[in-house]
């Protein structure tokens, strides 16, 4: 039954109140409140220039983007074939692949990170296996460095990539591929000339989602990274928990928020135009 | 041709093992009888579960997690249902931007949400309050509910609602006798996934829990910063068990009701 304007508004009211109460107002209040501790706009600008120009912070920003970029590439590299297989599979194989993706997807991030810590630690299972087989003499440093962060984050973010690519691939009309084959194109040519271009928007959407989630990551890099793998989210947390430096945390939050929201806007446009991708 | 197919299948099996192996290994290790991580374990026991249940801090973390997740689940499902119905049936402008706003808590880094809420909570003495933590979890669980219920309500034919109205049902009757029964499987799955979202949430809890309302993920976090001990394998297995249970229930409900799996 169609709803009137008032009806729709009343039904949306609790949701809007929740959003306002624990999302919009707190974030807005925090940014404005913390920055106004500095004084007027001139002082805030001065501090912003000083903070954003400082070596540690530029380093963290570059680090964050670089790690998120590498993770995006890794998830794409692994996720594309998996999504392809999923979109082609039927019956039991389909269910099996789906379970393999969904079980980790819905498992807590901290549990997934812990699982990799068990595997990659100095006395972890991978080192034990390699030592036992006599392949290495001394345990490898697989964690508390860049490699650990990349492995952990890729594992956590891979399902987002696979599921986005899958919905893009599912929307490809199989008759197009058959037509190309009928015209005499080789399987490789069909893949590169027809299938890849038709799933490109899925690659862009999946890449954006993974990158957006990657730059805001905290848990995995904090537990598996080394001293030089500081990311922005960790820096923000540190400014508050250890240094009680609210204004600096607010400035960095603003930067993170601006980048996230602008990429989200791009994602929204891509997914609104593309068939098969839910906004 | 056959060789290529076999190669692709081997690759696929390897990838699937790679997906599941870390989780399965944690489950197996949690039943280990040894004092340190060895795989496969030489003996099996429940000692890590005994230690988990015997420690009152772990027990109260479990209780906090369950209570907060239950409150989150009720609030998010209820609010999400109303909003999803309004989005599907309401004829108003600006649905696109509104959707973007309502889904934003999924995209905005949890660190940002957590610190914003913490900034306010600290002023109003709300740190450590379970209902308040549940409310904050509800804002991240709500988009999950909205997506699930919107997809289900789109499939409810408005003509059925019209027919019920013509037959003399009032709005509440239409809701109770037509909309709710048709959307029930989705409501159950929305409730399950909002429960899971809260049960697994770490970032917001980390800031808001204080000492009074530590949840399981927060306890795991603090333990992991110190050392990787097998008790955490047992706790993790409990969390994995809850996830598996939720996924199976969701699958069973969809199957019983004949709803196609997403």
Image: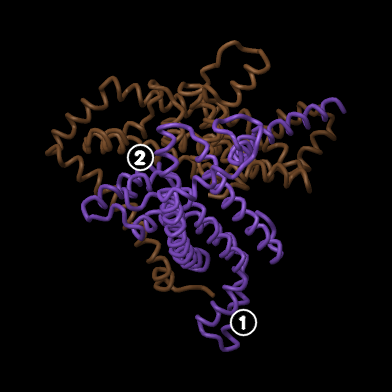
At horizontal 74% and vertical 33% (from top left) the residue drawn is B13
* Residue A193 percent across, percent down from the top left: 71, 29
Residues at circles 1 and 2 in contact by the CB criterion of under 8 Å = no
Q: How many marks?
A: 2
Residue at the far left in the pictured view: A39
Q: Which residue is mark 1?
A: B163
Packing grade of label 2 (10 A; few <14, some 14-19, many >=20) is some
Q: Tell me the number on the disc at residue A272.
A: none
Q: Is residue B31 visible?
A: yes
Point out the frontmost of discs 1 and 2.
Answer: 2
Q: How is the image coloured?
A: by chain
Chain letter, disc 2 residue: A
Nearer-the-camera pick, B213 or B110: B213
> Vertical placement of B242 versus B218: above or below?
below
User: How far from the left and from the top, in percent, is residue B69?
Assistant: 46, 57
The chain whose colour is brown is A
| Residue B177 % position (x, y) | 59, 79
Residue extending farthest to the bottom is: B168
Rounded to the nearest angstrom, the CA distance separating label 1 from label 2 is 47 Å
Name the image quarter holding residue B152.
bottom right
Badge 1 sits on which subunit?
Answer: B
Expressed as whole percent of the image width and height from the top left, the position of residue A68 reads 47, 29
Which quadrant would residue B250 be assigned to in this image? Answer: bottom right
Q: Which residue is mark 2?
A: A257
Residue at the image point whose x is 59% and y is 45% from the top = B46
The quadrant of the rendering that contains the N terminus of chain B is top right
Indicate whether A239 appears above or below B75.
Answer: above
Q: Which chain is purple?
A: B
Q: Is residue A116 above or below residue B55?
A: above
Q: Are marks 1 and 2 on the same chain?
A: no
Q: Residues within 10 Å of mark 1 (few under 14, many from 20)?
A: some
**SS class, disc 2:** helix
């Amino acid at each position: 039954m169609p709803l009137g304007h008032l009806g729709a508004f009343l039904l949306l009211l609790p949701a809007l109140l929740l959003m306002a109460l624990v999302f919009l107002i707190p974030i807005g209040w925090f940014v404005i409140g913390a920055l106004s501790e500095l004084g007027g706009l001139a002082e805030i600008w001065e501090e912003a220039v000083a903070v954003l120009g400082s070596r540690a912070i530029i380093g963290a920003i570059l680090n964050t983007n670089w790690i998120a970029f590498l993770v995006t590439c890794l998830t794409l590299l692994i996720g594309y074939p998996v999504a392809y297989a999923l979109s082609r599979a039927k019956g039991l194989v389909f269910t099996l692949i789906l379970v393999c993706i969904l079980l980790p997807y819905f498992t807590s991030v901290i549990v997934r990170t812990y699982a990799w810590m068990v595997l990659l630690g100095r006395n972890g299972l991978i080192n034990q296996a390699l030592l036992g087989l006599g392949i290495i003499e001394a345990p490898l440093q697989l964690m508390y460095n860049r490699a650990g962060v990349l492995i952990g984050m890729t594992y956590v973010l891979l399902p987002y990539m696979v599921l986005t690519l899958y919905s893009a691939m599912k929307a490809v009309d199989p008759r197009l591929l058959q037509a190309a084959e009928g015209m005499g194109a080789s399987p490789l040519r069909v893949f590169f000339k027809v299938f890849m271009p038709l799933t490109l928007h899925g690659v862009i959407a999946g890449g954006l989602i993974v990158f957006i989630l990657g730059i805001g990551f905290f848990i995995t890099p904090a537990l598996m990274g080394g001293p030089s793998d500081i990311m922005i989210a960790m820096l923000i947390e540190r400014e508050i928990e250890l240094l009680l430096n609210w204004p600096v945390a607010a400035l960095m939050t603003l930067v993170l928020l601006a980048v996230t929201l602008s990429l989200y806007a791009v994602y929204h446009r891509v997914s609104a135009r593309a068939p098969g991708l839910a906004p | 041709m056959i060789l290529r197919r076999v190669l692709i299948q081997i690759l696929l099996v390897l990838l699937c093992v790679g997906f599941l192996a870390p989780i399965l290994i944690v489950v197996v290790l949690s039943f280990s009888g040894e004092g340190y991580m060895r795989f496969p374990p030489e003996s099996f026991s429940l000692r890590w579960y005994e230690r988990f249940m015997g420690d009152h801090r772990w027990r109260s973390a479990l209780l906090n997690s369950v209570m907060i997740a239950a409150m989150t689940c009720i609030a998010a499902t209820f609010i999400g249902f109303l909003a999803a119905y309004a989005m599907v049936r309401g004829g108003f402008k600006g649905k696109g931007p509104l959707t973007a706003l309502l889904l934003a808590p999924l995209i905005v880094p949890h660190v940002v949400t957590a610190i914003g809420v913490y900034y306010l909570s600290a002023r109003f003495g709300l740190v450590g309050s379970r209902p308040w933590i549940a409310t904050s979890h509800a804002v991240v669980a709500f988009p999950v509910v909205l997506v699930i219920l919107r997809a289900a309500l789109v499939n409810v034919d408005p003509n059925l609602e019209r027919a019920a109205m013509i037959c003399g049902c009032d709005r509440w009757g239409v809701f109770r006798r037509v909309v709710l029964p048709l959307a029930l499987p989705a409501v159950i799955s929305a409730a399950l996934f909002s429960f899971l979202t809260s049960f697994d949430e770490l970032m917001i809890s980390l800031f808001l829990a204080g000492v009074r309302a530590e949840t399981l993920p927060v306890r795991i976090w603090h333990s992991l910063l110190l050392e990787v001990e097998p008790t955490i394998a047992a706790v993790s297995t409990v969390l994995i068990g809850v996830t598996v249970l939720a996924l199976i229930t969701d699958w069973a409900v969809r199957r019983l009701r004949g709803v196609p799996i997403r």
